[in-house]
Amino acid sequence: MKELILQSLRQERQISGEELGRKLNISRTAVWKHINELRSQGYQINSSPRVGYSLVKSTELLLPEEIQLDLNTQIMGKQVEHYNEVSSTQDIAAEMARSGTAEGTIIIAEMQKTGRGRRGRRWVSPPGGGIYFSLILRPNLKPFQAMQIPLIAGVAVTKAIKATVPLQPEIKWPNDIIICHKKVGGILTEMSSEIDVINHIVLGIGLNVNIPGSLLAEQTAGIATSLIHEYGEKVSRVKLIQCFLYEFESIYRKYLASGFKAIREEWMANSHTMGARVRVNDRGREFEGKAFDLDNDGFLWVRRDSGDVSRIVSGDVSFCN
Amino acid sequence: MKELILQSLRQERQISGEELGRKLNISRTAVWKHINELRSQGYQINSSPRVGYSLVKSTELLLPEEIQLDLNTQIMGKQVEHYNEVSSTQDIAAEMARSGTAEGTIIIAEMQKTGRGRRGRRWVSPPGGGIYFSLILRPNLKPFQAMQIPLIAGVAVTKAIKATVPLQPEIKWPNDIIICHKKVGGILTEMSSEIDVINHIVLGIGLNVNIPGSLLAEQTAGIATSLIHEYGEKVSRVKLIQCFLYEFESIYRKYLASGFKAIREEWMANSHTMGARVRVNDRGREFEGKAFDLDNDGFLWVRRDSGDVSRIVSGDVSFCN
């Protein structure tokens, strides 16, 4: 009912409580209750005795009604679960995935108490300006192919950012989105599998959108930035998520149909990694070299100073410049 | 306290309630309550007014006290959770693993309502005669190596069976334990991972020990058998689990230290698969050939009738004979 009232408010510049009630076949008191509920969710709705209600401003929250408004996808985001505060959207999504929730479902939170990045590292997730969501995927892939998912997600994230704001984000292999060498987003891929079958993947995306640069500088020792800090103006979180869902669905389909080789070029075009001097730390084993290729499986190739080349299957890559 | 009473009963042929109470510093009434609790768990304890209590027979249940009695391991089975009835030990173990439960913990059930095998297939788990347990592992491996875990578990299962009962079980690649071409056990490996780090593995073992052959014949369309059916006598489930935990710990350590190549020979020696004519069905793609090798990664090599050889990464193998 709330959604229908919102729909009416969007269609009409102004509409009286009486008319709304008649249209939806509910009492004026019920209309009033729903209006108040919408207000409590952050919608600014004016009411005047003569002309009735009018929607002045949508909510700032990432509510399902907002995400799904004119969302142009078939699968991604067709189910949206929104929370004001969670421990971690990854945990909720994993739980839902285990109990059979459909592919494409996303779990969004305004803030995370224990948001995490790879290997249990903390992901700073303050309220109000970040995007923190987890997407449930059920690809018909072998477990070893799962490492390609964060790569294609990286392409979708950079495209979505570019479509929303005039900035040039780049992908840092395997899972970071950076602007001017600072982290603006991260991708976490967690999988449940048998030895040869993927049960589900939970793809987590964290993006620093409207988080003040000063807060990030303080909490991440200067390694992170945000879109608002780089661009200077507030960025629509809803539009960014919608763009991501659209771009990701498109690239995910292409990937499932034609494999990672079909995505490789696009990844290279959006990547910061090629040609860069990198330091590779694979749990203790450390070396430096120049990243010179990404192969059709999604692995990074690094040429060491000695001339030897290494295929990086795992490990952390840091940039020397 | 219950464990201490059990210990005393095992040490002494007979002991009075008064003496037990004095030894453990509890009242005779408290002793009597614990004795009754032990009886309700299946321990046969005689009591006579003059001589006191005596343990006639241990429980038939797979209780922690039984499993851990003289268990000769460092990690495996040091924590045992026992249930009379569960949906699936895999689900409970996964939940515990997520909340940080230590490596080596096992979850045992007398029966499973929805016991499962690979790819969501049902695993018949009637009460009274089966072994159904899940073991939590936290190996420092890459996710793609996880497929080697069921192989080394297969070796441990066959060795444990041989140590307990004079039968000749064999491993069918990748995850079945068979006797005379019939399934007597199965291994299910479920993993939670990031793209390059394993969070945990839950290794599930199902063994048909004292389940009547007729029941299995009926419920599995003749493809399964049990140890009691093959051997003709009841087999100690406790001893079998203890042997498994010991053998598995030993082989798991060797594997982590030296890789799968250190286990390969032993696997080959216990396998039914080498030289066998097999039909491979990998989600639709089907072909026949002869299994002729297992490589150092744990993959099966099959020579097709055309002469081509294939490395079987995934898929179901059935035996043509």
Image: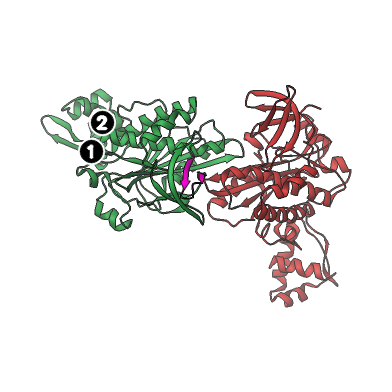
Chain colours: A red, B green
Farthest residue toward the front? Answer: B307
| Res. A59 mark | none
Q: Position of residue B41 (x, y in %)?
A: 27, 41
Q: Is residue B105 magenta?
A: no
Q: Position of residue B165 (x, y in %)?
A: 25, 36
Q: Is residue A245 left or right of residue B169?
A: right
| Res. B43 mark | 1
Chain to which the residue tagged by mark 1 belongs = B
Q: Nearer the viewer, residue A13 or A217?
A: A217
Count of numbered badges drawn on the protein? 2
Kind of element beneath mark 1 = loop
> How far apart, in angstroms, are the residues tagged by discs 2 and 1?
9 Å
Question: What residue is shown at x 35% (from left), y 34% (from top)?
Answer: B244
Q: Is residue A65 left or right of residue B231?
A: right
Q: Which span of residues is magenta-colored?
A: B299-310
Q: Would you name the residue on which mark 2 appears?
A: B6
Q: Position of residue B12 (x, y in %)?
A: 18, 25
Label 1: few (<14), some (14–19) or many (≥20) C-alpha neighbours in 10 Å? some
